[in-house]
Amino acid sequence: MPVAQTANAPSFESVWAALQETDRLIKENAKKAEIRWEKIEKNLGGLGNSMGQLIETLIAARLWEKFAAYPYNLKRAYQRVNIYDEKSIPKTDIDILLADTEWVMAVEVKRECTETKEVDRHVKRMSLIREYPPAEVKDKKLLGAFACGVVSPEVRDYAHETGFFVLELKGEAVDLIPPPDGFSPKVW
């Protein structure tokens, strides 16, 4: 037996139309929220890049002075040096490259150095730099360093064990963390 429709009850068609309109509004708002979220992610990514560039700039200033006690005269500095293979395919990059006529030092800059895997990545980077040396590196002895806004003791110790110098941003200055006794920087 069919259900009788009362005068106050909405029709099936009106309920169906309302549901379709609600579905359309939900999809429209979800799309707007997705676009807003994409903009937020883009802006946050840009902020991270800006912070990284700021830290690189702060660290790069007169960085060569930190190695005055060593037999290097690293007074030339280059930032963001790209490393390409023989087919011009990008392989890696160097945040800061310090150079003299005999030595070069590839400095990896990080806001925070809290994981030892960052040291392992720099080891791989150093191998790529040696395999595909840019003109500034060819026929020179290659050293490596980490320069961090903040460095954990675990990463500092591991980097030293691996043969890297370690620098840390302290206020407006950059300090070369004294290597442990017996430290010998690795020449790549």
Image (cartoon, grey):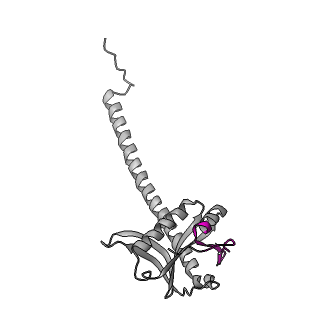
* Picture layout, residue 76 above or below residue 159: below
Residue 109's quadrant in the figure? bottom right
Q: How many marks?
A: 0
Identified at 47% across, 59% down, the residue is: 40
- Taking the magenta stretch, the answer to whether it contains residue 170 is yes
58 or 103: nearer the eye?
103
Identified at 51% across, 71% down, the residue is: 50
Judged left or right of residue 184, residue 17 is left
Q: Position of residue 151 (x, y in %)?
A: 63, 66
Q: Position of residue 152 (x, y in %)?
A: 64, 63
- Residue 151 appearing in the image: no
Residue farthest top in this picture: 1
Residue 13's quadrant in the figure? top left
Residue farthest right in this picture: 181
- Residue 127 appearing in the image: yes
Identified at 46% across, 59% down, the residue is: 41
Q: Position of residue 155 (x, y in %)?
A: 61, 63
- Taking the magenta stretch, the answer to whether it contains residue 122 is no
Identified at 40% across, 72% down, the residue is: 131
Judged left or right of residue 19, residue 122 is right
> Which image quarter is the N terminus in?
top left
169 or 6: nearer the eye?
169
* Picture layout, residue 153 above or below residue 13: below
* Picture layout, residue 150 above or below residue 66: above
Residue 85's quadrant in the figure? bottom left
Q: Which residues fall within the magenta stretch?
A: 160-184
129 or 59: nearer the eye?
129
Q: Position of residue 125 (x, y in %)?
A: 46, 68
